Image: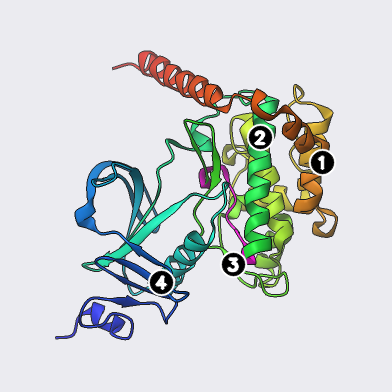
Amino acid sequence: MSSAFSSYSKIVDPSGRLNFGGKAILHASGVEFGNGVTFNINMDDLQLLDELGRGNYGTVRKVRHTRTKVEMAMKEIRLELDDPKLKAIITELDILHRATAPQIVEFYGAFFIEGCVYYCMEYMNPGSLDKLYYGEGSVPEDVLARIANNMVKGLRFLKDKLNIIHRDVKPTNVLVNRKGEIKLCDFGVSGQLEKSLAKTNIGCQSYMAPERIKGESQNNLATYTVASDVWSLGLSIVELTKGGYPYPPETYSNVFAQLQAIVHGDPPTLPLEYSETAKDFVARCLEKVPGRRATYSELLEHQFLRDDVMRGDLVDMAAWVERSLAERSKMKEDAQVKTPV
């Protein structure tokens, strides 16, 4: 009796090596990329620690590399009869091993055993940006500028150096560690640029740019450009300042009404306490007409980010992370006290 897994006979050889069409070969001892780069890591090297999260594509666990004592985040993805998942795996692996920039999460290696692909990345504690804001105005403007600067630099690196659009920019895909370093992650839906146009519409729908939502509704898949990531960047910045998603679902009768507001309504703005410079930066990102939206180069020249460069080490990102964690913890404790047993 043939198993479902036998359908992968073209990419899994009898020795258990997973071959992604010459782009990468994964096995129990590591990964060999088609460009000659090799990462050797395996399950025997790792001590399993806490589970960090679960998503559509698998589970993420904290692990410790026993020989070096380095803590890592290990993503586990079970191989299934799902071509999009296979494409997402090789896309993310390919980007991670080539994306060597301070604003991109570091890649330590990958391996394949017993029908699962595992890859190990830099462990960013406390995790994604959505775990740090706790209300309107909880992210100070100097911190906001530092976050925006790193996001823009990371996205420009992907575009200029790797010819990649991220396509899923949102606070949950921006990681922060206790040093206050900001890094992009989750490249499973990233698209290879073809004449500055990616021809597939995927990613998180509620963070889509207006032109992308309209294109999808009209079955026009040629609507995603770099400018669409700039919209998602602007929306993410607004979310950090408001302490929540700028188009809260509870405000709308259904998801269609929510998407209509994104397409036809006025774009969200920063709260009053932020400067006109910050508000203009966001407005340049959330321009409804993609051709008038700012480019990454223009954003890096904007006064909002130029001021961040001038501040340099005066922005204590590590202290902000600790304050935010303490405040979130206090809010959680208060909520538990108020909840009747």
Q: Amino acid at mark 1?
A: His
Nearer-N-terminus badge (1/3): 3
Residues tagged 3 and 2 counted as in contact (Cβ below 8 A): no
Q: Secondary structure beneath disc 3?
A: strand
Nearer-N-terminus badge (4/3): 4
Residue 246 visible in the displayed image: no
| Residue 338 in magenta stretch | no
Which residue is denoted by mark 4 in the rendering?
A: 86
Between disc 1 and disc 3, the foreground one is 1
Q: Amino acid at mark 3?
A: Gly
Between disc 4 and disc 1, the foreground one is 1
Q: Can you say whether 232 is above or below 303 in the image?
A: below
Residue closest to the eye, 338 or 118 = 118
- Separation (CA) of disc 4 from disc 3: 14 Å
Quadrant position of the C terminus in the picture: top left
Residue 325 visible in the displayed image: yes
Nearer-N-terminus badge (2/1): 2
- Separation (CA) of disc 2 from disc 1: 13 Å
Residue 158 is situated, as x and y percent measured from the top left of the image, at 62, 59
Q: Secondary structure beneath disc 4?
A: helix
Residue 292 is situated, as x and y percent measured from the top left of the image, at 85, 55
Give the residue at x 74% y 39%. 268
Which residue is denoted by mark 3 in the rendering?
A: 191
- Separation (CA) of disc 3 from disc 2: 26 Å
Q: Which mark is residue 146?
A: 2
Give the residue at x 81% y 45%. 284
- Separation (CA) of disc 4 from disc 1: 39 Å
Which residue is denoted by mark 1 in the rendering?
A: 302
